[in-house]
Each structure stands twice: as C-alpha cells, then as structure tokens.
Amino acid sequence: WWDPVIGIRVTVPLAEQWSFVGYADVGGFGAGSDVTYQAIAGVNWQFSKIFAAKVGYRYFYQDYENDGFVWDMAAHGAYLGLGIGF
C-alpha cells in the first residue's frame, strides 16, 4: 500500500559542527492506511565535508486494514547512523 503524508523538518545549528534535527509527519487519511505518523529528534555531528554522524530517537505508528489483513503497529527506539552527502 501507499500513503500520502505531510510533514515538517527543522534543523537548528548548535555549534560549528553540531545541529539538532526534528522531523514529524502524518498521513494515511484512508488512502492506504487509516493513519500513519512518526516523530524524530536527534543531533548530527558534521565531522568532515561529506560525512555526518547521527544519533537520536524515533517513534513510528501505522494502522492499516485490508481484506482481513490487519497491520496495527508502533515502533520506537534510538537510532545511530552515518550520513554521506555528495
């Protein structure tokens, strides 16, 4: 299935190489799932021109039903990543 979503993302510089990242979206609207939403908060450390370390927390929820198939789930937890810009 597919879901239309609307969202917002904000990046706030904290120091020369550090930034806060916040992201939230909501979707579904009955087109695919009944509702889906997520929220993310984290920090990025830009340690070179093309690489950034990322750490934060994410919460994700989906509620979908179709022909007896039910997908009603929530997942949340910390994340750790490497961003590569080119």
Image: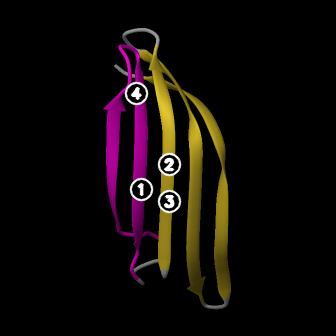
Q: Point out the tag, 4 or 2, that comes first from the N-terminus.
A: 4
Q: Relative to 12, say whether 37 is above or below.
A: below
Residue nearest the observer in this picture, 85 or 54: 54
Q: Quadrant of residue 51?
A: top left
Give the foreground label among 3 and 4. Answer: 4
Q: Position of residue 29 (x, y in %)?
A: 39, 80
Which residue in the structure is indicated by mark 4?
19
Look at the image and tell me in which quarter the C terminus lies.
top left
Q: Point out the tag, 3 or 1, that comes first from the N-terminus.
A: 1
Spatial separation of the CA atoms under disc 3 and disc 2: 7 Å
Mark 3 burial class by Cα count in 10 Å: few <14, some 14-19, many 20+: some
Q: Point out the tag, 3 or 4, that comes first from the N-terminus.
A: 4
Q: Which residue appears farthest toward the top when viewing the image? A: 48
Where disc 2 sits, the SS reads: strand
Spatial separation of the CA atoms under disc 3 and disc 1: 6 Å
Asked whether the residues under the numbered discs 3 and 2 touch, taking CB atoms below 8 Å apart as contact, a structural biologist would say: yes
Q: Left or right: where does residue 11 sit relative to residue 60?
A: left
Q: Amino acid at mark 2?
A: Ile
Which residue in the structure is indicated by mark 2?
40
Q: Position of residue 49 (x, y in %)?
A: 37, 10
Taking the spot 66% from the left edge, 70% from the top edge, the residue there is: 73
Q: Amino acid at mark 1?
A: Ala
Q: Relative to 66, say whether 4 is above or below.
A: above
Q: Amino acid at mark 3?
A: Gln
Asked whether the residues under the numbered discs 1 and 4 touch, taking CB atoms below 8 Å apart as contact, a structural biologist would say: no
Asked whether the residues under the numbered discs 1 and 2 touch, taking CB atoms below 8 Å apart as contact, a structural biologist would say: yes
Q: Left or right: where does residue 36 sit relative to residue 57?
A: left
Which residue in the structure is indicated by mark 3?
38
Q: Which residues are magenta?
A: 1-29
